[in-house]
Image: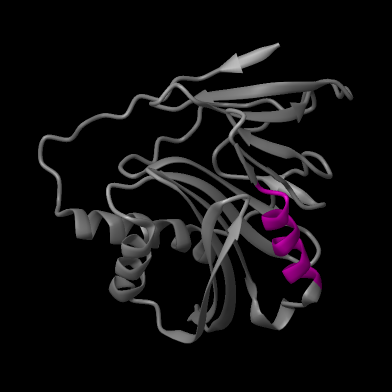
Amino acid sequence: MQFLYRIMLKRRIKRPPRRIRLMAAFLFALIIFIFTLSHMPSVSPRYYFTLGDKFTFLTPSGFTLGQLYDFSSIDASSELKEFILPLPDSRRIIFKYPQVVAFGNPLNLGGEILQSVDFTVKDPPSHGLVQIWSLNTSLDKFLELSKDSSSIDYLSFDSKKNEKDHIPYTVWEYTFNGQGKIIRAMEAFFDDNPYMFRISIYAEDSAFNEDLRKIFEDMLNSVTVK
């Protein structure tokens, strides 16, 4: 059984400059994890997240879905269902889930962000997100603009480029002050022009350990883009 939701992107008559919209959208995605902490029900130990037979990664153990969906309790079953979201170019996001999960309407973040789902990992405690963006500029220019326009006071910042299965991606690792706490962030940006796939994890620096780094790296190593 499949659930199909259609997302309609509305065109605004008057839009602020693209530089401002990009910066605002990028900062919004970060802020929701710094200032919005919640207890969400656990869904399943591990999931495969697939974008229409093109973009797939394995979620970490202790993965809990968050803001994109509403949950309610239904009869548990080991049978997996598929949640399907269409993209403008006829590709699809396919997310497999057990019957214990029920979905509500997805959020329309608008603008450049086509899809966004946040998650938590119980141990070590961390928050993360997976996003699909549609960019009208190169990924390098987008990241440069985002960093230069950010109001974040970086305590440390490291950027590396890599490639997986001929798909280039950039990894950021940085620390910054957030509500009196030092936050460590690890983010990966996959370049599938005109789309960008973003995987991010945030945690208090005091709670950061090599287990969290391994969770992030395992997620990146599981990514496939066909």
As drawn, the residue found furthest toward the top would be 1
Which span of residues is magenta-colored? 211-223
User: x, y (%) of residue 149?
Assistant: 28, 72
The residue depicted at 31 percent of the width and 63 percent of the height is 141
Residue 72 visible in image: no
Which quadrant of the figure contains the N terminus? Answer: top right
In the image, residue 186 sits, relative to residue 65, either above or below, namely below
Residue 88 visible in image: yes
The residue depicted at 79 percent of the width and 27 percent of the height is 100
Which quadrant of the figure contains the C terminus? Answer: top right
Q: Quadrant of residue 114 in the image? A: top left
User: x, y (%) of residue 85?
Assistant: 52, 25
Quick check: is 225 in the magenta stretch? no
User: x, y (%) of residue 71?
Assistant: 66, 32
Question: Seen in the image, is 141 located left or right of residue 180?
Answer: left
In the image, residue 5 sits, relative to residue 119, either above or below, namely above
Question: Seen in the image, is 220 located left or right of residue 61?
Answer: left
User: x, y (%) of residue 104?
Assistant: 57, 26
Quick check: is 214 in the magenta stretch? yes
